[in-house]
Amino acid sequence: SPLLHPAQQFYLLLGNLMSPDNNVRKQAEETYDNIPGQNKITFLLQAVRDASAAEEVKQMAAVLLRRLLSSSFEEIYPGLTVEMQTAIKTELLTGIQQETSPTIRKKICDIAAELSRNLIGIFGNQQQHYMEVIKRMLVQCMQDQANPQIRTLAARAAASFVLSNESNTALLKHFADLLPGILQAVNESCYQGDDSVLKSLVEIADTAPKYLRPNLEETLQLCLRLCADTNLTNMQRQLALEVIVTLSETAAAMLRKHTAIVAQSVPQMLAMMVDLEDDDEWAMADELEDEDFDSNAVAGESALDRIACGLGGKIILPMIKQHIMQMLQNPDWKYRHAGLMALSAIGEGCHQQMEAILQEIVSFVLLFCADPHPRVRYAACNAIGQMATDFAPTFQKKFHDKVISALLQTMEDQSNPRVQAHAAAALINFTEDCPKSLLILYLDNLVQHLHVIMVAKLQELIQKGTKLVLEQVVTSIASVADTAEEKFVPYYDMFMPSLKHIVENAVQKELRLLRGKTIECISLIGLAVGKEKFMPDASAVMQLLLKTQTDFNDLEDDDPQISYMISAWARMCKILGKEFQQYLPVVMGPLMKTASIKPEVALLDTQDMENISEDDGWEFVNLGDQQSFGIKTAGLEEKATACQMLVCYAKELKEGFVEYTEQVVKLMVTLALTVSRVRVAAAESMPLLLECARVRGPEYLTQMWHFMCDALIKAIGTEPDSDVLSEIMHSFAKCIELMGDGCLNSEHFEELGGILKGKLEEHFKNQELRQAKRQDEDYDEQVEETLQDEDENDVYILTKVSDILHSVFSSYKEKVLPWFEQLLQLIVQLICPNRPWADRQWGLCIFDDVVEHCSPSSFKYAEYFLRPMIQSLCDTSPEVRQAAAYGVGVMAQFGGENYRPFCTEALPLLVRVIQAADSRSKENVNATENCVSAVGKLMRFRPECVNVNEVLPHWLSWLPLKEDKEEAVHTFDFLCDLIESNNPIVLGPENANLPRIFFIIADGVSNESIKSEDACSKRLANVIRQVQTSAGLWTQCISTLNETQQKAIQDLLSTA
């Protein structure tokens, strides 16, 4: 009503903004949006500072004010009068000092931090004064002797300020003297039972680790002391350890300079791992309860794993080796158990160093398979299983006899099912990565053992209802069959009846996992032994699966059988091939349902997280300032599997899958936005689905493509994970090749151009950042290794940019050049002589495509790439030489008249590369073969640039090409031209060269450079048939060939 005071009207409005009633809230939002920015600031600040206003109104106002400063700062703030700007700062600073409510006070600190962040951004140094004010205020509050709570809040505000300015190095240096106050507050607050400041310290270690450098020693000492203090809660001790472990991941090089403290933290982790309960029921437990993730033992183990990966084995193994050896000799089982678990934990990080002494480690660990305490035997199996994965296949090749017999013996331990099951699990890890030839030596013994245990455990299941060991044994059998493949055929009948029996009868809820694993086992055995052996059982198995499937609708969403079923269907599809199509109607329903699970997502602050993380199945991404983004991962594994299965069906059944393409395409497009494994599967499916849709004709195909295209382009622009990004880019390029000319409209082109430009600019920027890191004070060889990895990742994305451009050039030809010009300067930058070789290689490849697909117009860019291309023919990098030689070949074949002088100039350079001493060595051979092919193309398409008669004999002596199959096809085509025209130089006087030509052809066939479907193979077969008519010549030609080559000639005659 107009009679209300404006401030009260505004409070009402704030109240309505929080209203549960949608209409009221919408109306309030409109009113709020229409208030001019300057008035908003005045009203909001007034509300925050109004002692008489309700707490939730003040909170709402504080949130809105911070949001206003972060989103619309530049539109509003510079337009305020200087008095107004000063008033705002004064109000905020007094607010921080006078506000009594801790929540509001924290929020005012946040507003002040937001304001100062923006001020630094805009006004640079003239704002130095305010920085001083903020710093003084925080220091003052951290020293407030009367109020411990204010000290804690000020420390959190200081941390929050550091976090929101993580990338501003100068500012962090300026605020370095806040750190001692923060550390003091960490110490104090922990003993007051408040770990919020400690959590802030973990966040600093995570996002702004360099801020800790001036006081790193003190920080580490403090954390070590807290971690060792058993009077604190487990949570606090683990958080203190987390600071050290996080630094090993975010600032490894900096931490490597403080090895003494790291060495002191290792025994702390081991001590946590000894913190176990005695539990008499343990060995007999049939349900594996989830490990207690808050327990010290689990936290210690995970910390050890991470710090070993973070700092590397060179540092960690020497620190830990003695401790582990002593623990393994301790009479108390808890120490032996911890020692073995520690050994499992460091395998990944200490890979190289442990590999060197693997012999002694393995012989030692195997002794503990016979330890008197069952939990130590369990830990020994754990270490073996872990090493079998970490050190595969060396581990399998070196220790197969000892390990297999130790595990089989441990599996006999009838009185401790939990140990038996873990031995079976270790056996699975061992066989998964075991070379087939090795496993076959033990196959009979393994299978007999597994069979005996399976039969015994089936009896136990029937009598006592225990199933833990059976679950693992079934999977061990599956894994043995999977590795042994057709060698498993003789044992098929020993197992299949029992396995089918389990699936038919194990219908109770508590047997769901067993049933799922058995279904997996049957389908893996079927795949291993092949269609012929499996067929008699196939329809019975399909019926069992179908029956489960119809009961499927009653299965609960978290039923473990679902994901096993889905994978089993896909294996059945591989076994049955096209005959599987009849089952699609039954299979697709549940599969689509699982693939479409909507993940639960939530934005949480750290307090909420504590309540929720106990409830398993959430994964968190830290957003800083004690906020996290949570995603419920239950169901995501199944979702990812389901998507991979859809990919499998599309691949195996092709047009048989056409009924489903439309719904699958729509689903995959929405999935491009979820977790990474699902995004990869979704991207992979796109080109396959287009192939399926082809049968329905061009209109249907175009419709499918419209759905996908926007989603793919968006995904390329926004995908954060480089592994997923490269898959998406690869799929997009494949789709464009499939769809061809006209598949992108002008908006697509505009968006794609912007994105590719961004990717190339980012590529150069990342290289500069890496150079800067090489100048950093903490730079060492381990940092260099990381930088090399990053570099490889970057180059991989560059190759995908090249893939996409290739698909666009090959589909659109010359008309796409005007669009390409926005990228031209960036590509030119790639081929500058000072760039790394990979940049030059891919830059040249892109220009190769321009010449190949967009000539003769390509010549208008010749000034940018011709010189670099000719010079690159003699480059030191074989990859660069290969790209340049390929370029000369396409210039001759497609470039047109303008390129003639360059063809002449290139010839001697190509010959020089081919005739170099080590031109056929492993690293040089591909580049050399491209040069040979280019010389062939020059003679074939530009004979006026080459003295053909002089070059031909040399060229023949350089054949055959063995490595580059695509170029080999070109050389054979040309060879056919020459022979068919009875070229005297090629045939030689009185056909003396024919035996050599036979040798070249035979080599091509046995090397699979000549495929029976190529037109060229018919022409070559005709050449051979002509020679057959003259018996003498035929004998002469064939007699020089060895058996393989003679067979190759016969093959060619029979197929072509």
Image: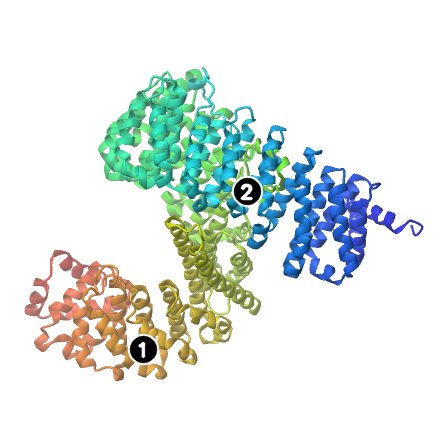
Please name whichever residue, 187 or 853, is drawn nearer the observer in this view of the structure.
187
Which residue lies under the disc numbered 2?
593
Instruction: Return the mark for residue 714.
Output: none
Q: Is residue 611 above or below residue 622?
A: above
Q: Quadrant of the C terminus?
A: bottom left
Q: Is residue 743 left or right of 267 when viewed as pictured?
A: right
Q: Is residue 639 left or right of 451 when viewed as pictured?
A: right
Q: Position of residue 1024 (x, y in %)?
A: 16, 68
Q: Is residue 543 visible?
A: no
- Give the structural element (helix, strand or loop) at label 2: helix
Tell me the amino acid under the disc marked 2.
Lys
Tell me the amino acid under the disc marked 1.
Ala
Visual colour scheme: rainbow
Q: Position of residue 644 (x, y in %)?
A: 45, 46
Q: Residues within 10 Å of mark 2 (few under 14, many from 20)?
A: few
- Give the structural element (helix, strand or loop) at label 1: helix
Marks 2 and 1 sit apart, C-alpha to C-alpha, by 55 Å
- Kindly indicate the quadrant of the structure image that contains residue 108: top right
Q: Residues within 10 Å of mark 1 (few under 14, many from 20)?
A: many
Q: Is residue 444 above or below residue 658?
A: above
Which residue lies most toward the right here? 3
Q: Is residue 201 left or right of 498 when viewed as pictured?
A: right
Q: Is residue 820 above or below residue 376?
A: below
Which residue lies under the disc numbered 1?
892
Sequence-wise, which precedes: disc 2 or disc 1? 2
- Kindly indicate the quadrant of the structure image that contains residue 865: bottom left
